[in-house]
Amino acid sequence: MCAQPFKFNLLVMQKLFLSCLFGMNFFGASAAPAPAKQEFFAIRVYQLKSARQEARVDSFLQGVLLPSLHRQKITGIGVFKPVGNDTAAVRRIYVFIPFRSLEQYDEVMGMQPSIAGTYDDAPYARIETILLKAFPDMPAHAAPWSGQAYSPDRIYELRSYEGPTESYFANKVQMFNKGGEITLFDKLGFHAVFYASVISGAHMPNLMYMTSFENMASHDDHWKTFGADPTWKELSADPQYQHNVSHIDIVLLHAASYSEL
């Protein structure tokens, strides 16, 4: 008399086990896939006063920091310099580092070596660190030119959009995701590296994103096409998305020869 109930319970347990293992609902329709986990990014900006400081930081990044990060399973590291960096009064190097979580960021960055220097012979003027969280519609960074030869003509465009208030900022983030701005960039071939909200930085509330192009002519052509696109005209005229950007910073960059992006 007890064999049949026991057999039924065993069948239920088997279904529950398979449901957990494969993410399927064996009692009805398939379970909805879990949303992709969003990465976190750190952008370190080295401010430099001279070509000598630039060379010292380059040597440190290529020979010390990147190998150290690789040993901790961090890859996809980008190193970039502004167009015209060699003639600028204040030179800069931008280092993009992706992380799976804030816990990984805390663990990894707390163990990194620093550049040797003295108070009267410092290797840089200042370091700024910006911490970001990837947008849900692009939860992980990309390496658009992976497998292709390095090109010094390639352009990377880093943009920062500040919002007048936190609610306007959230509205602009929504415009990128649910509004379809990311989808439009993808359709027009902007070769995005990331889109993300800044969660710690000097210009909050703001978002940042990076797109890339074969050269400056390609960059200009893409933005001309974007501005004339009917989808963008409709989206930018939508009443719900008005006045959500109060300031824009744009930096055009070249990748360093040892950059992984």
Image (tube, rainbow, N blue to C red):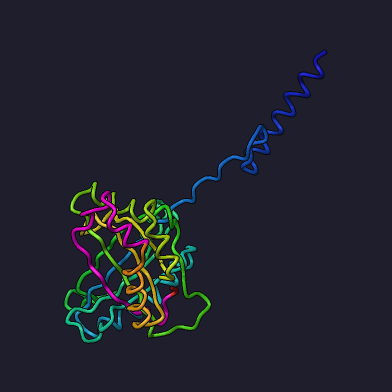
Residue 154: percent from left, percent from top: 39, 81
Quadrant location, the N terminus: top right
Report the residue at 64% width, 38% height from top: 19
Residue found at the far top of this picture: 1
Which residue range is magenta in the image? 231-259
Q: Image check: 39 left or right of 10?
A: left
Residue 106 in sight here: no
The quadrant in which the C terminus is found is: bottom left
Q: Viewer-proximal residue, 173 or 15?
A: 173
Whether residue 33 is visible: yes
Residue sitting nearer the eye, 163 or 49: 163
Looking at the image, how many numbered discs can be counted on the residues? Answer: 0
Residue 170 colored in magenta in the image: no
Q: Residue 30 placed where, x, y %? A: 62, 40
Whether residue 251 is in magenta: the answer is: yes
Q: Is residue 242 above or below residue 8?
A: below
Residue at 16% x, 77% y is: 120
Q: Is 117 on the left-hand or right-hand side of 24?
A: left
Which corner quadrant of the image does residue 235 belong to? bottom left
172 in relation to 51, above or below:
above
Which residue does the image show at 47% across and 63% down from the upper left?
A: 72
Residue 245 placement (x, y as % from top left): 22, 58
- Which quadrant of the view contains residue 20? top right
